[in-house]
Amino acid sequence: MITAFVLIRARGNRVQALGEAIAELPQVAEVYSVTGPYDLVALVRLKDVEELDDVVTQGILSLEGVERTETLLAFRAYPRRLLDQGFALGQE
Amino acid sequence: MITAFVLIRARGNRVQALGEAIAELPQVAEVYSVTGPYDLVALVRLKDVEELDDVVTQGILSLEGVERTETLLAFRAYPRRLLDQGFALGQE
Amino acid sequence: MITAFVLIRARGNRVQALGEAIAELPQVAEVYSVTGPYDLVALVRLKDVEELDDVVTQGILSLEGVERTETLLAFRAYPRRLLDQGFALGQE
Amino acid sequence: MITAFVLIRARGNRVQALGEAIAELPQVAEVYSVTGPYDLVALVRLKDVEELDDVVTQGILSLEGVERTETLLAFRAYPRRLLDQGFALGQE
Amino acid sequence: MITAFVLIRARGNRVQALGEAIAELPQVAEVYSVTGPYDLVALVRLKDVEELDDVVTQGILSLEGVERTETLLAFRAYPRRLLDQGFALGQE
Amino acid sequence: MITAFVLIRARGNRVQALGEAIAELPQVAEVYSVTGPYDLVALVRLKDVEELDDVVTQGILSLEGVERTETLLAFRAYPRRLLDQGFALGQE
Amino acid sequence: MITAFVLIRARGNRVQALGEAIAELPQVAEVYSVTGPYDLVALVRLKDVEELDDVVTQGILSLEGVERTETLLAFRAYPRRLLDQGFALGQE
Amino acid sequence: MITAFVLIRARGNRVQALGEAIAELPQVAEVYSVTGPYDLVALVRLKDVEELDDVVTQGILSLEGVERTETLLAFRAYPRRLLDQGFALGQE
Amino acid sequence: MITAFVLIRARGNRVQALGEAIAELPQVAEVYSVTGPYDLVALVRLKDVEELDDVVTQGILSLEGVERTETLLAFRAYPRRLLDQGFALGQE
Amino acid sequence: MITAFVLIRARGNRVQALGEAIAELPQVAEVYSVTGPYDLVALVRLKDVEELDDVVTQGILSLEGVERTETLLAFRAYPRRLLDQGFALGQE
């Protein structure tokens, strides 16, 4: 599985309708209205990189009211190791 | 549960060490190296908004090599409704 | 109570009408025309984070003339401690 | 009273100390850690515009770890009129 | 007197008409076409901060062709002291 | 006389000293601390364009603590015509 | 041969059609949908710099839905030297 | 094969050394000095997305003098169809 | 003579027509299509600063398809001194 | 001959020394201090595109105090046609 975060800027009065429509995309695991310079963020799980074309180009970008998208594609996961021994952070 | 996406810009040679350290933060569900203008993205699950102080101010910002963070806090989730009936998108 | 600051960019000739309309939103405590890159700032008090959807997505973003909003959500307050003993600032 | 919102970008490991120090400034009514591109926001009440010099130039900017500030000065307040008659928004 | 500098971006073919119209605003002392990312700059003298609403919101922003304004409000003047003794600059 | 507006970004703890030093530059008519993304604005009157070199390159840029300057040079003034007949604005 | 990378921002619902059309430009060696702030990137091989006019001004910019392009023109190639002796990187 | 374009900003006096070092990375097919806001662009061919970690995080970001990188990952290629029949562009 | 560089952003399909029209402006010595974030650059020679109004406000900005201009006005020339003795650069 | 415009941002107190040094570069025809977001602009004439490496990478970027450069390379010139018949501008 490849994970990606699609940051979406939408026309003001289309945010809710877009959130609902994007939630129906099969590759979209979670989608939220968020604070900050973007209106929506979609957490996406992909079989392969090419599937981004279905989700973003064919899917999200084809929806009315989408102004800009920026896709952050994950290329390395950092799993948790110290499950129980509490947390030792390389603080300064 | 409140979800947030913490976008992190790091000093080049500290990305891996930071990815590993951030993965140990209890509120961090997933953390990745990503393409785009940020180096790392952390998917965070919070009991309440105040916990962001632990994760971001006390946690991530205290780590050596963190240059900038931007937190996108989710304030509305869009659940999937049409599980099986295939996908009807409000295309243009 | 959760506090948020909603920074609003509006079409030039809609600033006053928007200021008046936003003032009527129940969660809005104060709203002003301001100097700087934004036209209006609304100080918002929320019961919970989800209420942002009412104020921003359903409220402000649905108004004609709103071009952009950016929400700064407070996740930690810093109360005043040294009420009377004058002010000692950790100056350089 | 003149209201201003001072948006503050700080060095990562100085955010908490700065929040606490800024809270002690006499003109600062409220100060918070916030999500978004700034780290702290201070809500300031001034007798006159010149007082900004005390709060920002002499106060906040003199603190160690402050990287950037942007002051949004309010020049018109929009009071609420329709207290009880519910809310009629000039929606589109 | 409070001084402010209103930086104005205008639609290309409206710059001259706007310069002439803005010059008629009572609070505007001087207005120019300028080089740089803005098209016009107005030097404004105000009795009080609230007058910005007349000049900017009711005045400049209501004009056809104004795309963006940014107001820099002066909150401290630095008068000249060494009138005749030539100029001693704290150069490095 | 040629007019220019020099927008100055300064290191936080040098703003006041710079304001005072810049005020002593012979070509500087007025200089202020201002709200917005710049810390200081100098209103400059020049005999000719070349004098900008004295004011900016030799003067302001040589001062300790100046981070960035942007010069907006006026190339056309819009004088007021309708002195007494009140104000007719080409509103929309 | 001169190499250039043309970064293209397109209207959301025109990305695929533009990708296909740009692929037909004789100077275009490869063209892709990409993650990040641009929608498409074209790898271009030119006989001389003037050919950019055919590819960009006459070609890509004349297509419906192209919002912005940025051309990065290569002026020095760095060939690989250490083909077999493994890789020695001037790491810190 | 997955293609990516790594845009690199470098410290002025390190551009040449970096170009030479990056050319030795096994996944780097071509690397150039370019015009525009970046100093170098590397054309990268990957077996899978995870290899970006070797090229960018372990490779390029570990080099002295690299200030910023932005990776544009290709997720769809547009092959040329009309090889000989000249070029038909969907011009406006 | 005063020199200025006018950087011009144009609508995609108007670049060539604008290049040709701008070339006819009497004060324009040279005009080119260029790589980078601007589409055209005009090298302008002026009798005095006021002539910018003819070239930019009355000339370029009045042309259909001009989206943005930024004028860089030269205020000091650096003539070459070491004509024949080769080149001695204050390298680091 | 290929023309390029090299926009240069320099450390404040190095502008004059850099202007003088850059003027000595053989490919530099003219170099100026300019208004706007850059400090210096060099007008460069090149035999071929590769010469940019001498001028920018080996030349300008190696100088102490150069913070950023952006090169706008000309790829099409628009010669003046209507020498004497006055000026007919495709005004709106």
Image (cartoon, coloured by chain):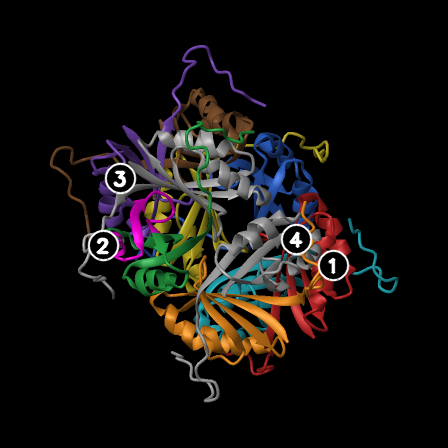
Chain colours: A green, C purple, D brown, E yellow, F blue, G orange, I cyan, J red
Residue of label 1: J58
Give the amino acid at mark 3: Leu
Identity of the residue furthest to the left in this view: D85
Q: Which residue is mark 4?
A: F48
In the image, which is nearer the foreground, mark 2 or mark 4? 2
Q: Are marks 2 and 4 in contact (CB under 8 Å)?
A: no
Task: Please identify the residue farthest to the top as the structure is shown.
Answer: C85
Residue I31 in picture, x, y percent from top left: 59, 72
Chain assignment, label 4:
F
Q: For the residue marked with disc 1, what is the amino acid?
A: Gln
Check the residue under mark 3 and report the chain it is in. C
Q: Amino acid at mark 4?
A: Asp
Q: CA distance from mark 1 to mark 4?
A: 36 Å
- Is A19 in the magenta? yes
Residues marked 2 and 3, same chain? no
Magenta range is A18-43
Q: Nearer the viewer, residue G16 or G82?
A: G82
* Label 2 residue SS: helix
Task: Using the image, tell me which numbered label, if any, was put on residue A17.
Answer: 2
